[in-house]
Image (tube, rainbow, N blue to C red):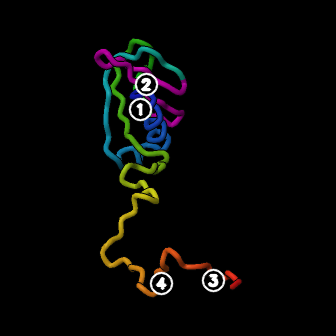
């Protein structure tokens, strides 16, 4: 069913662009009898799968389009939008997992404080 939804979305985008840009991207086709037909969709049987292809008023139709007719549908797949998700390689390291890299600055001996150092704002007694 996911394949059906994907095809419907991509075919809608491709068919709405018009025939001049229809062949700009790779073109595909599906052939089979029409199972369902509406003003916005055509469902075609291809083997054991049902292919749902979106259509619009701009879709060029040659012949009598009706349920049961064998058709060949030309379509393209086109991205309508893309959202990039953070993957495993993009994860930020946790605070305890950070390892120094070559060339990272190391604390100078003068900057290090001994364990028994007193805070600078301490007042003498």
Whether residue 119 appears in magenta in the rendering, the answer is no
* Residue identified by numbered label 1: 7
Measuring 42% from the left and 27% from the top, which residue is drawn there? Answer: 2
Q: Residue furthest top?
A: 68
Question: Is 107 placed left or right of 101 in the picture?
Answer: right
Q: SS for tag 1?
A: helix
Q: Residues within 10 Å of mark 1 (few under 14, many from 20)?
A: many
Q: Is residue 93 above or below residue 30?
A: below
Q: Position of residue 113 (x, y in %)?
A: 49, 80
Q: SS for tag 4?
A: loop
Measuring 49% from the left and 25% from the top, which residue is drawn there? Answer: 41
* Residue identified by numbered label 3: 120
Q: Residues within 10 Å of mark 2 (few under 14, many from 20)?
A: many
Q: Is residue 7 above or below residue 43?
A: below
Q: Position of residue 103 (x, y in %)?
A: 32, 79
Split into 4 quadrants, where in the image is the N terminus? top left
Please say if the residues under marks 4 and 2 sit with CB atoms less than 8 Å apart. Answer: no
Q: Position of residue 89 (x, y in %)?
A: 36, 53
* Residue identified by numbered label 2: 52
* Residue identified by numbered label 4: 111
Q: SS for tag 3?
A: loop
Please say if the residues under marks 1 and 2 sit with CB atoms less than 8 Å apart. Answer: yes
Q: Could you tell which of marks 3 and 1 lies nearer the N-terminus?
A: 1
Q: Could you tell which of marks 2 and 3 lies nearer the N-terminus?
A: 2
* Numbered mark located on residue 79 in the image: none
Q: Residue furthest front?
A: 125
Q: Residues within 10 Å of mark 3 (few under 14, many from 20)?
A: few
Task: State how far apart marks 3 and 4 are (Cα).
Answer: 14 Å
């Amino acid at each position: 069913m996911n394949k059906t939804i994907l095809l419907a979305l991509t075919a809608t985008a491709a068919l709405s662009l018009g025939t001049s840009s229809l062949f700009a991207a790779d073109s595909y086709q599906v052939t089979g009898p029409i199972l369902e037909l509406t003003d916005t969709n055509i469902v075609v049987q291809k083997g054991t799968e049902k292919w749902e292809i979106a259509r619009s008023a701009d879709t060029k139709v040659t012949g009598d389009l009706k349920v049961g007719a064998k058709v060949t549908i030309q379509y393209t797949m086109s991205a309508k939008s893309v959202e990039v998700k953070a993957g495993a390689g993009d994860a930020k390291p946790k605070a305890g997992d950070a390892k120094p890299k070559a060339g990272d600055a190391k604390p100078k001996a003068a900057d290090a404080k001994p364990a028994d150092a007193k805070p600078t704002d301490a007042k003498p007694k």
